[in-house]
Amino acid sequence: AQTVTQSQPEMSVQEAETVTLSCTYDTSESDYYLFWYKQPPSRQMILVIRQEAYKQQNATENRFSVNFQKAAKSFSLKISDSQLGDAAMYFCAYRNLGAGGTSYGKLTFGQGTILTVHP
Amino acid sequence: DTGVSQDPRHKITKRGQNVTFRCDPISEHNRLYWYRQTLGQGPEFLTYFQNEAQLEKSRLLSDRFSAERPKGSFSTLEIQRTEQGDSAMYLCAVSSRARENTEAFFGQGTRLTVV
């Protein structure tokens, strides 16, 4: 079974600064997807960024980028130029990439990191 | 708005009562998932539907839990004889076959409190 670990329960950053959230995972699969989701208080969980394991290039979405280290099974999220609206719970998630099968599409989440942005 | 509506948003019930939650995807998504999220934790998978077929159930889904997806559109999750340990946020997520390798869209969840 796959596991996802986020070792930082809480992180804080000053507005306009950069912060990195850590995530490690364990799997015996070679093909899979990794995600970072953002969950603002009392609001829906939304996708921040995704990474396909077969791609060596790190994914980037505007101010958000990842550092994907497949051999180390590490997947960190870097938020640049932090904004007040970035304050939320952030979840790292794993998804198998199987050829059909019942686990296809199911997400395994980490415990989450609460990000506080100070003005 | 992610296009997934969940009802009710909040539910307080007495221990031993039955409760039912509903998930309504606005547009067509053939894959539907239920997750449970306890306070301060990440969501945990409960069950998965592909169209109307329930293809996987987690061991977290005891025999007091039942889920349906008639006609492959909306879904319901029922908990019978609720226990205090059932208190949690119940999240519904959908994805489409065309985007099955990418994102899942989540509803706002139903927060259940069992007193």
Image: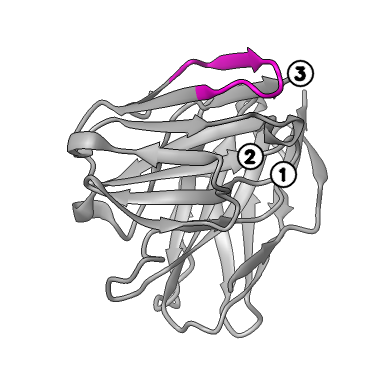
* Percent x, y of residue B50: 26, 52
Letter of the chain that mark 2 sits on in the rendering:
B
Please provide the residue range marked out in magenta.
B7-19
- B85 and B81: which is toward the camera: B81
Between disc 3 and disc 1, the foreground one is: 3
Q: CA distance from mark 2 to mark 3?
A: 18 Å
The amino acid on which the numbered mark 1 sits, given as a three-letter code, is: Gln
Q: Is residue A33 above or below residue B86?
A: below
Between disc 2 and disc 3, the foreground one is: 3
Same chain shared by disc 2 and disc 3: yes
Look at the image and name its color scheme: one colour
Q: For mark 3, what is the residue?
A: B115
* Percent x, y of residue B63: 54, 47
Give the SS element for disc 1: loop
Q: For mark 1, what is the residue?
A: B41
Disc 1, disc 2: CB below 8 Å? yes
The amino acid on which the numbered mark 3 sits, given as a three-letter code, is: Val
Specify the quadrant that holds the C terminus of chain A: top right
Q: Is residue A71 above or below residue B16?
A: below
Q: For mark 2, what is the residue?
A: B37
